[in-house]
Image (tube, grey):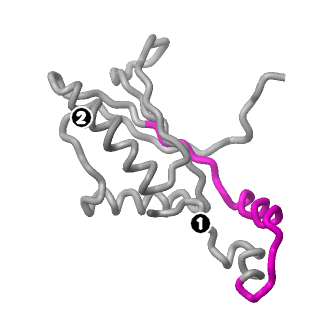
């Protein structure tokens, strides 16, 4: 399993201390680790090929999402169906949102790409790749919550 939460000992002074025989308090290590982590979201807008909708949904729900969450350590992944289009011209009726935190988001994405290219991820040809849109975002501050 690839671990997006793994810290590089050189980047975390508490890990470095522990490797020299010192013991860091868990709360200090967790605080230091959190400072290095970047909150990420990947979205995928998708459409199944005509006549292959059930195959597409079965693959996405029972194979694709579990593979990504279990092999790469996403904190969660979920799928959504379009209810109302408010603006824009995208035609994809389905949305997947993947959430994770990583010290180096681009290295994490590179590991996913390598796994896909090497056949370690199950692919499906039931998806219309001509309409698919996938993008990665990083957090711009903390979520706004009700006051």
Q: Is residue 147 above or below residue 11?
A: above
Q: Nearer the viewer, residue 113 or 25?
A: 25
Left or right: 24 as drawn, with respect to 58? right
Residue that numbered label 1 is attached to: 6
Q: Earlier in the sequence, mark 2 or mark 1?
A: 1
Q: Residue under circle 2?
A: 127
The span shown in magenta is 19-43
Please state the horizontal and vertical placement of residue 103, each as a whole percent of the image.
61, 61
Q: Are marks 2 and 1 in contact (CB under 8 Å)?
A: no
Specify whether residue 68 is painted magenta. Answer: no
SS of the residue at dot 2?
Answer: loop
| Residue at horizontal 38 percent and vertical 31 percent from the top | 45
Residue 16 percent across, percent down from the top left:
73, 81
Quadrant assignment for the N terminus: bottom left
Judged from this view, the residue extending furthest toward the bottom is 20
Residue drawn at x 64%, y 53% as measured from the top left? 38
**21 above or below 139?**
below
Coordinates of residue 83 in the picture (x, y in percent) = 44, 13
Task: Tell me the SS state at disc 1.
Answer: loop
The residue shown at (49%, 12%) is 86
Q: Left or right: 31 with respect to 2?
A: right
Query: Residue 121: x percent and y percent?
Result: 30, 54
> Image quarter for residue 130?
top left
Tell me the quadrant of the picture where the C terminus can be found. top right
C-alpha span from label 2 to label 1: 33 Å
Q: Is 35 within the magenta?
A: yes
């Amino acid at each position: 399993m690839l671990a997006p939460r793994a810290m590089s000992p050189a980047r975390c002074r508490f890990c470095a201390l522990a490797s020299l025989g010192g013991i860091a308090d868990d709360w200090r290590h967790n605080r230091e680790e959190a400072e290095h982590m970047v909150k990420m979201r990947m979205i995928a807008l998708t459409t199944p090929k005509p006549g292959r909708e059930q195959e597409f949904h079965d693959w996405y729900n029972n194979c694709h999402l579990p593979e990504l969450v279990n092999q790469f350590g996403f904190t969660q992944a979920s799928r959504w169906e379009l209810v109302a289009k408010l603006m824009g011209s995208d035609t994809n009726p389905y949305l997947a949102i993947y959430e994770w935190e990583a010290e180096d988001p681009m290295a994490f994405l590179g590991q996913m790409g390598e796994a896909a290219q090497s056949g370690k991820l199950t692919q499906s040809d039931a998806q219309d790749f001509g309409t698919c849109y996938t993008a990665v975002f990083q957090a711009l501050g903390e979520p706004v919550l009700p006051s």
